[in-house]
Image (cartoon, rainbow, N blue to C red):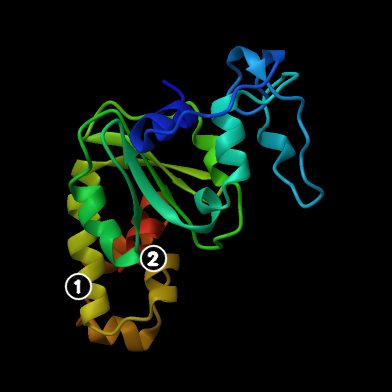
Amino acid sequence: MMLSKLICTARKIEPEMGDTAGNCIFCGEYSENGYIPGLKTNFTAYEWLQDGEIVCPYCNHMYNEQEYRKSMWVVSDKEYKKIKREEVKDLLLNPPEPPFAIYLTRTYKKQGWIRMMNKINYDQSEFFVGMDYDLIFVKSIQLNVYIPLVELLIERKIPKKEVQSGRLSPKSIEKIEMNIDVMKKVEKYANDPLWEVCVWMM
């Protein structure tokens, strides 16, 4: 199932049908009920489009609803829900029953959902999360390593910028009592986009 169909299913939306056949530029699926693309002048996500001639009814709904780019959300076949940053940690640790998709954003401007179109998740222990135009691969086993360490560093008043980059200042190193093991882990984990998400969501 493509993301746009999952969204419409969860929200019980029956999208309006068009009358043009072809492959959708957003999801790549064939439809006989599409629309001729009429992308707005402020649309910039051309590099993520599929080869196609139309916009299918389901993707047409998503494209024309600003909510999907101006908010963070989680969707399964049973529920669509907007989320706040303080809810992200619990959501990643306890994702919904498959199939599901999770979209996060820092900018509240980008059409990042386009990249998630064929990234519906069917596994609660390993899954993809959209973050604007980035796709973050989440492993529960890694989350359970990253989160306690990030929480420890934040509790010690280490600046988030340093935690994210992995480069701790001498003052911050003092705050962790010059723990070499922690320093090495932070430096190593900083190369992982999932680590960046863990820092951002705290």
Image location (x, y in percent) of residue 9: 37, 29
The numbered disc on residue 200 is: 2
Q: Is residue 152 visible?
A: yes
Q: Residue at x 56, y 62 (%)?
A: 107
Which quadrant would residue 50 be assigned to in this image? Answer: top right
Which quadrant would residue 140 be assigned to in this image? Answer: top left
Q: Is residue 192 visible?
A: no
Q: Residue at x 63, y 16 (%)?
A: 33
Secondary structure found at label 1: helix
Image location (x, y in percent) of residue 129: 39, 43
Q: Quadrant of the N terminus?
A: top left
Residue 79 vs 195, above or below: the answer is above
Which callout, 1 or 2, points at the residue further toward the start of the chain?
A: 1
Image location (x, y in percent) of residue 52: 72, 18
Residue type for callout 1:
Leu
| Mark 2 burial class by Cα count in 10 Å: few <14, some 14-19, many 20+ | some
Q: Residue at x 37, y 38 (%)?
A: 11
Residue 26 vs 89, above or below: the answer is above
Residue 24 vs 197, above or below: the answer is above
Task: Kindly indicate whether the residue at mark 2 contacts the one at mark 1 (C-beta within 8 angstroms).
Answer: no
The numbered disc on residue 44 is: none
Alpha-carbon span between mark 1 and mark 2: 14 Å
Residue 171 vs 28, above or below: the answer is below
Q: Which residue is denoted by mark 1 in the rendering?
A: 152
Which quadrant would residue 23 be assigned to in this image? Answer: top right
